[in-house]
Amino acid sequence: MNSLSAHISWGKSASSEIFILAHQVVSELLYGLVFCWYHKAGWEEVFKPVSDTCTDPTGKTIASWPGNTETQVINLPIIDSLSPRPPFLPLAIPEDLAPRLTRLHGDPIVWWVGQILKYLLRPQEKTKKMLQDTMAKMGFKRPIVGVHIRRTDKVGTEAAFHGLEEYMAHVDEYYNGLELKQRVDKRRIYLASDDPKVFKEAQKLYPNYEIIGDPSIAKTAAVSTRYSDTSLFGIINDINMLSMSDYLVCTFSSQVCRVAYEIMQNYYQDATTRYRSLDDIYYYGGQNSHNMIAVLPHEPKRKGEMYVSVGDVIGVAGNHWNGFSKGRNLRTNQIAFYPSFKVKDKIETAKFPTYSEVHKAQ
């Protein structure tokens, strides 16, 4: 059994870090200590328990990570502080699934994390009814683009400000392409934000769009009221709506956006072309290194560009969305820009227990 005692955001609270660790050590999981900051009644009043048989945080032997095979309860820090760092942390995927995943999915780690999140976030009947009633009340209808605009505490600290028009430019682009293939009765978006003013701005500037969303959720998402039941159910609704959209426009610097994108993988065979991030590439908070492999060489054309040979491994720092990414060439140690199309993801794998091993351990 694993327990977590750290005060972190709900996006990270819902993260699959602990479940991945539990999967590797072939143990069950008690999950909900962090959640109590958002909902005093705990995780299991909102979502189904992760285990029906392992629900007690006490045990004869308790230790901090990594413990040993005899430890019944392992206390985990947040993933950023995990030491020693096991090889099966994201961005690693199970070795036995890798051959199929790499053929069928554009970003296997997103699919893998999405499956775990979908299991962790199985709603209780009351929660499921709340989600269904909200969708019906708001008139959720396809086609629809999910737009998540994170402001408040993120802007100026972890992320830059992006105006509504930046998001809507990509929404317009999506609908322009869709209308070439099918009839679109109405352009609509599901708008989620922690800034209530965005809703009035969208209605004023984009009258040709049907704006679906709830400004009251934005008000409860303010820093002063974020740790409340109302805010919790608001963000659950937002993530559900965003993940079920046909296309997602957001900033991957926001965990809400990344969680919605991860869950979206459950609704499409491959949803890796169904998003646009205005800032970061996809990442898993606290992940191991994200490396790319060069498939084409590159000779610098201007100052600041990287010398690249085929086969070079490049640690990614970020995509600048202008055709170039920034990173470190692990062969030359050069930090510079390189053409994004000349590299591909280096798929990391780890030996996870197979299902037969899990059954033997029970």
Image: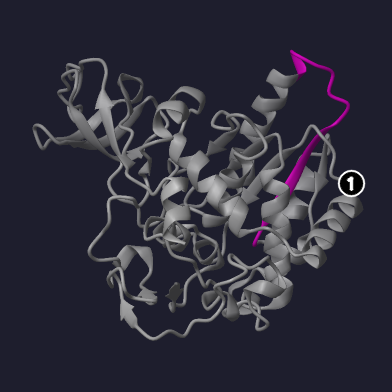
Q: Position of residue 338 (x, y in %)?
A: 26, 26
Q: In which quarter of the image is residue 119?
A: bottom right
- Left or right: 113 in relation to 243: left
Q: Which of 128 and 358 is in front in this view?
A: 358
Q: Toward which corner of the image does residue 330 lie, by quadrant?
A: top left
The residue stretch that appears in magenta: 179-194
Q: Nearer the viewer, residue 282 or 72?
A: 72
Nearer-the-camera pick, 115 or 13: 115
Instruction: Return the residue at label 1.
Output: 139
Mark 1 neighbour class, 10 Å CA radius: few under 14, some 14 to 19, many 20 or more: few
Percent from the top left, x then y, of residue 152? 56, 65
Which residue extends farthest left?
332
Position of the N terminus by quadrant: bottom left
Residue 159 in view, yes or no:
no
* Quadrant of res 309: top left
Q: In this view, does 258 lie above or below 327?
A: below
Secondary structure beneath label 1: loop
Q: Is residue 317 left or right of residue 145?
A: left
Q: Residue 114: where, in percent of width, then height?
A: 55, 46
**What type is the residue that disc 1 sits on?**
Gly
**Would residue 176 be found to the left or right of residue 64 on screen?**
right
